Image: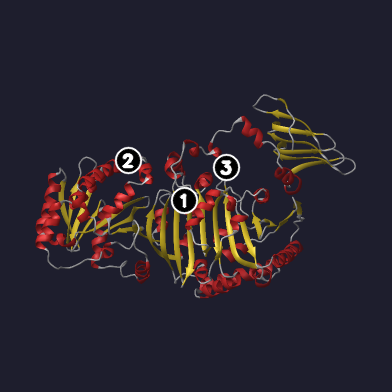
Amino acid sequence: MRKKILIAFLLLLLSGGGYLLWKVYFTKGIQADAFAMVPADAIFIVETDEPIESWRNFSSSEMWKHLKGFGPLGDIGKLADGLDDIISQNATLFSVFGQRNLLISAHLTSAKTYDFLYVADMKDGAKIGPVKDGIISLLKQGGFDYSSMDVEGEKVHRFANPADKSTLNLAFVANRIVLSFSESIISASLKEYHNPTLSKDQRFSQVLNNSPSGGLCRFFMNYAALPGYLGVYMEQSSIPNDLLKAMTYTGASADLNERRVMLDGMTGINDSMSSYLKALAQSGSSKTGAASVFSDQTAFMLNMGFKDFRSFYDNLKTVMNQDPQAEADFKKNSRLLERLLNISIQDHVVSWIGDEVSIAQYRQERVIGGKINNIIAIKPASMELAKRNLDHIEKMIRRRTPLKFKSYTYKEHEIHYLEIKGLFKLLFGKLFGKMEKPFYTFLGDYVVFSDDPRMLLQTIEDQMAGKTLANDASYQTFMSDFSGESSVFAYVHLPRYFVDMKGLLHPTKWQSINTNKPYVLCFPQLGFQFTAEDGNLNTIFSAEFRKPEEADLIIPELQPASADSLAERDSLSDVDQFLIENINGDAHREYYENGQLKFIAEMKDERFNGRYLEYWENGQVKVKGKYRDGEKSGRWRFYNDKGELERRERFGKKEEGPEEPEQE
């Protein structure tokens, strides 16, 4: 493997000969800034001044012991074990060499591949001929085919491995040694050294100078290059390009313990972009409270917080005014919505929104056509004001549309419906744009909207039962890593989000992730927090680590459906009954002569297919069940005319027949 060359070479760098020659021949000379050798297209950069100590800490962690079982890391794991042995057997020598600066950066080499650049501080040893000649001579003797080339007046030594066709490229520049297995990357590095751009970028310098040190290493992210990297794994349509363009760089100190990896630093805002994130960075922060209404089945949550929404909205308009096209589009869309809905956005929407807006996605049984349902929670400044203005918007919509949807009550919660295409996108950004025809209700301290009525009703059920994300013990523990207030907070629960990912990723990448579940699901919870301060964003990232047990790797939604699970799926819940009675416009209905509903059934291709409800003439439920392709399926329940359960019967794959009555 080509990594063997790199590891062997790094071990060679740490051998005693170079150090002794440096001590003997030490003289002052040109010192090269390591960041000046990193090409501006770096996706990310890792920096450490204690590579040996950092490696010891990382390699001894349970996280690394688990991750090195991942196939692509297998050879690295074996070599790393060898490196551990050598370091432990030469502790005194390596304690001297532990203190040297090392940068590792990642760069795209094609649309679907990337490779790395390594820049190591050789002290003044890099300028001593015997040291360089000795390194080159030893590598030549290692069975590698040697050649060289000139880039910007710097000599690049090339060592080709006939066994795996890889080539290690290295160059000595001032006090640095530069290495890469990619000819294009090392060439770009040397060109960068003679004509630096990244190190002279004031936006990067600001992040670099304000990033905390300490911990395992420092980590820098370049958002201009991130979309290309994400494109290696994701469909382009799933990449949040607008959000990434709003940021310049993140610089953070990275650390780990037995339960998590954590980054703590700052993120710069792109002043040239008219973005929602830029407006958020100028609008303060608030507590993240929407977890108190979102279900404990939340797979993804994005929260936006501000001192108050009116200030954010004013800042957003100011930001948009800095870009003539963005300003024109914003004003045009605002006028269009106000004319279409016959409302004032300022008076009827902005006026009642408080200090928090959140969007979430739940664990889904399956993803069809990439469709992932969303739910939004808005904390109002005044619930009474919110209700009054939403009622006004509903009335305005009813005047202009033939759609007649009346409000219904589900377990003491009124369910309303709006057609507000473009409103959420205008106010909150592109991620909220798919919420065009939401159902909504008032839940706790929030107004809750969803594009899927079942999702909204399930949220009510879970909130009433106390089954919320905020009450999830693992979520509570995880949140201890974060500040109490946020401008932006993103949360992902990977086991719950696993099926949802199938709708976002390229099929081949999804298959790879599914195959390697142990190395994905070992990070069950991920969180990313921005908190506004002085026009920039304090940044915290945390990834929980837990070595998964066998049971943790079973994703129920990806397992073949058992007879019991099919029967349960075919059983009618309170949510099902409400939907079929009040929401589903495709159902077939028949009535008694007195006008009372006799039965209602979902249809497909002129056959019963879906939920079925039958009633006694007095209005009590008589039968609950489901059909599949015209045939009864799953568990059916039969009631007397007083609404009391008399019996259950099972139909379909499992043996048909009566079951013992159950209490409901």
Q: Quadrant of the C terminus?
A: top right
| Residue 660: x %, y % from top left | 73, 28
* Label 3 secondary element: loop
Going by the numbered disc 2, the residue's amino acid type is Gly
Tags 3 and 1 touching, CB below 8 Å: no
- On the rendered structure, is 551 left or right of 637? left
Residue 502 in view of the camera: no
| Residue 252: x %, y % from top left | 38, 61
| Residue 661: x %, y % from top left | 75, 30
Give the residue drawn at x 62%, y 58%.
377
Residue 339 disc label: none
Position of 169 relative to 607 (above/below): below
Quadrant of the rendered image containing residue 539: bottom left
Identify the residue position indicated by label 2 in the image: 74
> Which scheme is used to colour this image of the protein?
secondary structure
Q: Earlier in the sequence, mark 3 or mark 2?
A: 2
Q: Earlier in the sequence, mark 3 or mark 1?
A: 1
Going by the numbered disc 1, the residue's amino acid type is Glu
Going by the numbered disc 3, the residue's amino acid type is Arg
